[in-house]
């Protein structure tokens, strides 16, 4: 039973756009607390796969489960987010004119389980959570700065922090180190590794050195299907993978 212990489980998923099979009999199983990297050439179906998990795109067939019992195909996009599946797009969408602290506060407010009016007095637990997240994302001491004044890397971390305010079980992260400096990339690796265990983290990334530095297990997508799965060493020694990447 491949689904045993999985927080996210896809089986036999198919999606066609105007007859073109973007996702073709896709199976994927992510363990609770796992950090998984998804790689694959352009057009492999990585974005569509994330769209399916978050409910943005409905598959034509197949199964998509959260844990053992929650059928994600029965839920709307907002309900899936509410369950604790957070997604970080490549482009940061922080509120530029608001401070770092306010961005985290607004993100907490977006969680409908937190019932409070905007900018009402935070209770001690909420302040402590914001402070904890500031520490996790390395932005303690920056909380009063407007988000618009942060570096590109800091904005990306703030956005991860905003997702963390909603205590997600699963985090989908799209190309987190695109456009980052070497040092920001190293700090992002550390951050994502530190999130695993407490959260399941799925990272789509093109930077192979980065993938190697964070992932125990890598999934290679090709033509909407899993071409190979394993450690980076296993993946890079796989003739099918080599062929796909040389043919790019
Ligand atoms: P990746 O993220 O790995 O680059 P995508 O999931 O974006 O791949 O795309 C997979 C394939 O599906 C591509 O060939 C793309 O052109 C096609 N595709 C994606 N979304 C649509 C859409 N809304 N309509 C038509 N074709 C699409």
Image (cartoon, rainbow, N blue to C red):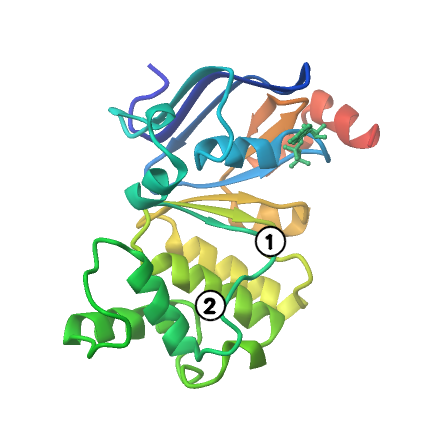
- Residue drawn 51% across and 76% down? 147
- Residue drawn 62% across and 57% down? 177
Could you say which quadrant of the image residue 85 lies in? top left
Instruction: Tell me if residue 85 comes above or below residue 117 in the rendering.
Output: above
Relative depth, front residue between 248 and 156 = 156
Question: Where does residue 226 sit, x and y in percent of width and height?
Answer: 58, 22
Q: Is residue 144 left or right of residue 114?
A: right
Outermost residue toward the front? 117
Q: Is mark 2 within 8 Å of ligand 1?
A: no
Instruction: Tell me if residue 22 comes above or below residue 177 in the rendering.
Output: above
Name the quadrant of the C terminus: top right
- Residue drawn 45% across and 83% down? 142
Name the quadrant of the N terminus: top left
Instruction: Tell me if residue 236 comes above or below residue 149 in the rendering.
Output: above
Could you say which quadrant of the image residue 169 lies in? top left
Q: Report crowding for label 1: few under 14, some 14 to 19, many 20 or more residues within 10 A (C-alpha).
A: some
Could you say which quadrant of the image residue 74 lies in? top left
Q: Which residue is mark 2?
A: 158
Q: Which quadrant of the render holds ligand 1?
A: top right
Marks 1 and 2 sit apart, C-alpha to C-alpha, by 13 Å
For numbered disc 2, what is the local secondary structure? Answer: helix
Q: Is mark 1 within 8 Å of ligand 1?
A: no
Residue 234 visible in the picture: no
Q: Which mark is residue 90?
A: 1
């Amino acid at each position: 039973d491949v689904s045993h212990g999985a927080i996210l489980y896809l089986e036999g998923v198919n999606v066609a756009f105007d007859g073109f099979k973007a996702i073709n009999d896709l199976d994927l199983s992510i363990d609770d607390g796992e950090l998984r990297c998804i790689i694959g050439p352009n057009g492999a179906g990585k974005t569509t796969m994330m769209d399916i998990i978050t409910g943005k795109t409905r598959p034509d067939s197949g199964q998509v489960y959260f844990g053992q019992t929650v059928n994600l195909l029965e839920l709307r996009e907002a309900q899936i987010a509410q369950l604790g599946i957070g997604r970080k797009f490549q482009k940061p969408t922080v509120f530029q004119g608001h401070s770092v602290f306010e961005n985290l506060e607004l993100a907490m407010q977006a969680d409908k389980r937190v019932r409070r009016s905007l900018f009402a007095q935070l209770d001690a637990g909420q302040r402590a959570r914001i402070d904890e997240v500031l520490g996790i994302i390395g932005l303690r001491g920056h909380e009063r700065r407007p988000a618009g004044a942060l570096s590109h890397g800091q904005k990306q971390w703030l956005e991860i922090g905003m997702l963390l305010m909603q205590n997600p079980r699963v985090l989908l992260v799209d190309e987190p180190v695109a456009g980052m400096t070497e040092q920001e990339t190293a700090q992002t690796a550390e951050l994502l590794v530190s999130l695993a265990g407490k959260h399941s983290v799925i990272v789509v990334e093109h930077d192979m050195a980065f993938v190697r530095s964070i992932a125990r297990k890598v999934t290679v997508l090709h033509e909407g299907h899993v071409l190979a799965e394993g450690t980076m060493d296993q993946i890079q020694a796989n003739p099918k993978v080599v062929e796909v990447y040389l043919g790019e």
